[in-house]
Image (spheres, helix red, strand yellow):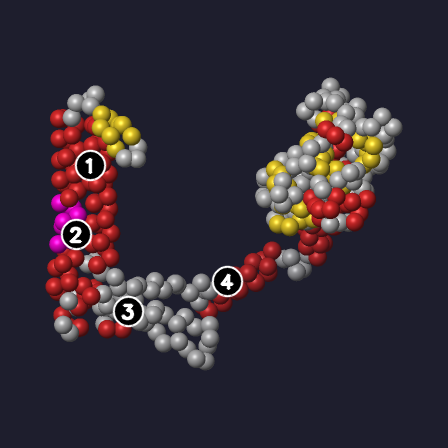
Amino acid sequence: MSSQDIPEENLPAEQGAPHGAVRVADEKNPFADPGLPPHEHRIQDIDERAAKRSERAVALLFTVSMLATIGFIASYVTIPNDKSIYVFPIGHVSAMNFALGLTLGVALFCIGAGAVHWARTLMSDAEIADERHPIEASPEVRTKVHADFKQGAKESAIGRRPLIRNTMLGALTLVPLSGLFLLRDLGTLPGTSLRHTMWAKGKRLVNMNTNQPLRPEDVAVGSLTFAKPDGLEETNEDFQTEIAKAALMIVRLQPDNIKDKRELEWSHQGIVAYSKICTHVGCPISLYEQQTHHVLCPCHQSTFDLSDGARVIFGPAGHALPQLRIGVDSEGYLQALGDFEEPVGPAFWERG
Ligand code: FES
């Protein structure tokens, strides 16, 4: 079959179709639009027998859909409501529900499949380039706008009245400052309060769930324990503020698995204590993977390696989780040996 036999809407642009345009890449201008790639004819475009086969396939799918719909109606009318059948691997199901689902599914699938096959094989597949209009204004329009602007400036006398011009510029410069002052309404500035937590030398670590001071033997290998400073109770007026800074994660690692030397020195028998507050934007970390010693922040998936100084191994967090140096007091309870040495929470502190 020659190209004269192909319907015009199936012809590519370079063969005379009224829409679309195929252009050759401009070697002098590498940014020029190279246009559409050469059009490839489908077998149905050049072989009428193939087109007929596709037509019959589409018609067959639509016919099967009709039969399935008739089957759906027949199932609804004829199958008793209480009859059940065995369907592998589901087991016993209502015969009517099974027939209704099956026939409706086939009917809808065949309509979809017929439409897709029709579109892919028989409908026109000519590519069309939709040219954009130039965005910049024409030289005439630009000249007119320029002239209008000059005319406006002249009529406003801004050039001849510097007092007005200067005071207007001053007013326009100062007025945004009022918005800056309104920012103070968002709350008091944090000052240095975020640099300090309730942890201090001798403060016991208390289990957040049981409210009991923790001993080393309470922390099992592979478990994740959350702790707070002794004396911080929910009834305290500033409980929310303080717990948001002081919440701890406690994990027991095999000392041999601890890669970071400082981490090992700051731990007790492999028990390490880290801030629970993510260094990205401050979500509480709650997921611990025992085999890898990774903890995961659920907010944006920052992942920290607790066996390597809680450094960031994935995600947007900017720095490692701060570690709390811990030991044991004379009665055998876990205690802090000072406050965190780095600010807890979001890493914007690093900018200073
Ligand atoms: S707050 Fe933890 S990853 Fe964003």
Q: Residue at x 64, y 57 (%)?
A: 158
- At numbered mark 3, what does the secondary structure look like: helix, strand or loop? loop
Q: Nearer the viewer, residue 253 or 30?
A: 253
Q: Residue at x 79, y 25 (%)?
A: 230
Q: Is residue 218 magenta?
A: no
The image position of residue 250, as x and y in percent, is: 71, 35
Residue 28 falls in image quadrant: bottom left
**63 versus 98 height, above or below:** below
Give the CA distance from mark 1 to mark 4. 68 Å
Amino acid found under the numbered disc labelled 3: His
Amino acid found under the numbered disc labelled 2: Val
Is label 1 or label 4 in front? Answer: 1
Q: Is residue 144 left or right of residue 225?
A: left
User: Between disc 2 and disc 3, whose residue precedes?
Assistant: 3
Is label 2 or label 4 in front? Answer: 2
Q: Are marks 2 and 3 in contact (CB under 8 Å)?
A: no
Give me the disc on residue 58. Answer: 2
Local packing at callout 1 (Cα closer than 10 Å; few below 14, some 14-19, many 20+) is many
